[in-house]
Image (tube, rainbow, N blue to C red):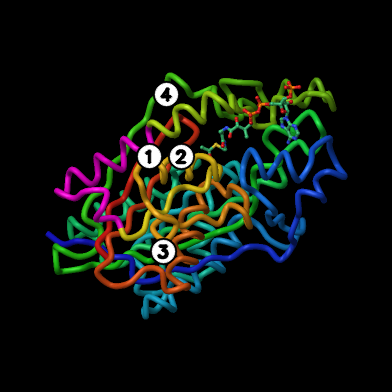
């Protein structure tokens, strides 16, 4: 039996900065409304044709591999979390294997949206704990900008999301007091449609119908969100799953050195921070600069926090996510 530890981290965001004022030129919104409700000041959008979900993931992965001090051929398995794959199928995991020119290791795609990275870390951790693999590459990457409605009709959602990628290498750790101590995963499919994209999917609108109708006003292929319902569920599940993880390891809130919440909305993060009585030094947020990047938000935030020296050896680091599904989870790490 082993533990796994995060041995390397990297992230990539496109250069193209889109401010709230830029969005105000496309739809009826304002910098004031967006900042007040979400905390977001700007986000990145890819330049079409320049980057894909996979290419951003590969750029983040290359940094993580170098920082892990391993060679790409030391990677035993690839896990890619995204809701915005380059192709409907195959998923981006195999494209990473191809583009990084890694030998024919297994590649798995996780499609758990906002909790995708936490789920992917949990899967990687199990493979390493069991002894099956030594180094697993985990990527979260998203291009939202290609699939949002940037007219006033879509303003409740399109102002929130941004593009970017983050990656981590998980490596075998022999000291069982170090690395990933536990992971905790949950779902409640009863609320599947509260935050969703219903078409094209064979249960929602059929691709053949969409083509036959050829209706420019068809909005069924844009995401939908019951914002207030998501908010209410998120704050409850975030705190529940963090407490579950702490309890499992006989730890308390005061033991947390760094909490990295999924960057859904600054108001959600602040709610959790206040509820737990944590200071700003103990919670890392960067949604102000990148918006909500779904499966990429935790690895981008974790990498930034680490790069800024805010995470040190021996720290207790907690990752927590909630999102579409609903799915949610936490990861408890002794760095
Ligand atoms: N600019 C200006 N006005 C807007 C915008 C916008 N971008 N979007 C919506 N509005 C308007 C609405 O049309 C509505 O107008 P009306 O009163 O005339 O009908 C008004 O603002 C209030 O709309 P609500 O949807 O009720 O606004 P709310 O206060 O709930 O804020 C928000 C919306 C920010 C989405 C909020 O519900 C929220 O934070 N929800 C949490 C969900 C979340 O953060 N999701 C992120 C992705 S999911 C995830 O990662 C977990």
Front residue (pair 217, 20): 20
Real-space CA distance between mark 1 and mark 2, rounded to the nearest whole angstrom: 6 Å
At label 1, counting other C-alpha atoms closer than 10 Å, the crowd grade (few under 14, some 14-19, many 20 or more) is: few
Residue at 27% of width from left, 47% of height from top? 183
Where is residue 197 drawn, in percent x and y?
A: 61, 30
**Ligand 1 is found in which quarter of the picture?**
top right
Where is residue 84 drawn, in percent x and y?
A: 60, 45
Front residue (pair 285, 208): 285
Residue at 46% of width from left, 30% of height from top? 325
Ligand 1 within 8 Å, label 3 CB: no
Question: Which mark is drawn over residue 168?
Answer: 3
Question: Label 1's element?
Answer: helix
Which mark sits nearer the N-terminus, 2 or 4?
A: 4
Name the residue that disc number 1 marks.
275
Real-space CA distance between mark 4 and mark 3, rounded to the nearest whole angstrom: 28 Å
Question: Label 4's element?
Answer: helix
Give the magenta-colored segment's residue range. Answer: 237-256
In front: label 2 or label 4: 2
Which mark sits nearer the N-terminus, 4 or 1?
A: 4
């Amino acid at each position: 039996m082993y533990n796994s530890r995060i041995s390397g981290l990297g992230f990539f965001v496109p250069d193209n900065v889109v401010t709230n004022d830029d969005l105000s030129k496309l739809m009826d919104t304002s910098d004031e409304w967006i900042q007040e409700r979400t905390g977001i000041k700007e986000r990145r959008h890819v330049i079409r044709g320049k980057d894909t979900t996979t290419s951003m993931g590969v750029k983040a992965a290359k940094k993580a591999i170098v920082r892990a001090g391993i060679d790409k051929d030391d990677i035993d398995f690839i896990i890619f979390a995204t809701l915005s794959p380059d192709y409907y199928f195959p998923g981006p995991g195999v494209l990473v294997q191809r583009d990084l020119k890694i030998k024919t290791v297994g590649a798995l795609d996780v499609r758990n949206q906002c909790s995708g990275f936490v789920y992917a870390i949990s899967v990687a951790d199990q493979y390493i704990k069991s002894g099956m693999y030594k180094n697993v590459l985990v990527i979260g990457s998203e291009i939202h900008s290609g699939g949002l409605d940037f007219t006033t009709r879509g303003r409740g959602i399109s102002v929130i999301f941004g593009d970017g990628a983050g990656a981590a290498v998980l490596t075998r750790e022999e000291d069982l007091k170090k690395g990933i101590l536990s992971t905790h995963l949950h779902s409640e499919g009863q609320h599947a449609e509260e935050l969703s994209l219903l078409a094209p999917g064979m249960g929602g609108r059929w691709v053949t119908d969409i083509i036959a109708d050829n209706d420019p006003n068809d909005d069924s292929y844009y995401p939908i969100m019951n914002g207030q319902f998501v908010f209410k569920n998120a704050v409850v599940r975030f705190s529940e799953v963090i407490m579950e993880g702490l309890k499992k390891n006989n730890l308390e809130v005061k033991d947390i050195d760094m909490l990295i919440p999924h960057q859904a909305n600054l108001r959600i993060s602040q709610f959790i921070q206040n509820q737990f009585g944590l200071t700003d030094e103990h919670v890392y947020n960067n949604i102000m600069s990148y918006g909500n990047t779904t499966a990429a938000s935790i690895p981008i935030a974790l990498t930034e926090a680490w790069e800024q020296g805010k995470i040190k050896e021996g720290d207790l680091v907690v990752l927590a996510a909630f999102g579409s599904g609903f799915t949610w989870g936490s990861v408890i790490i002794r760095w």
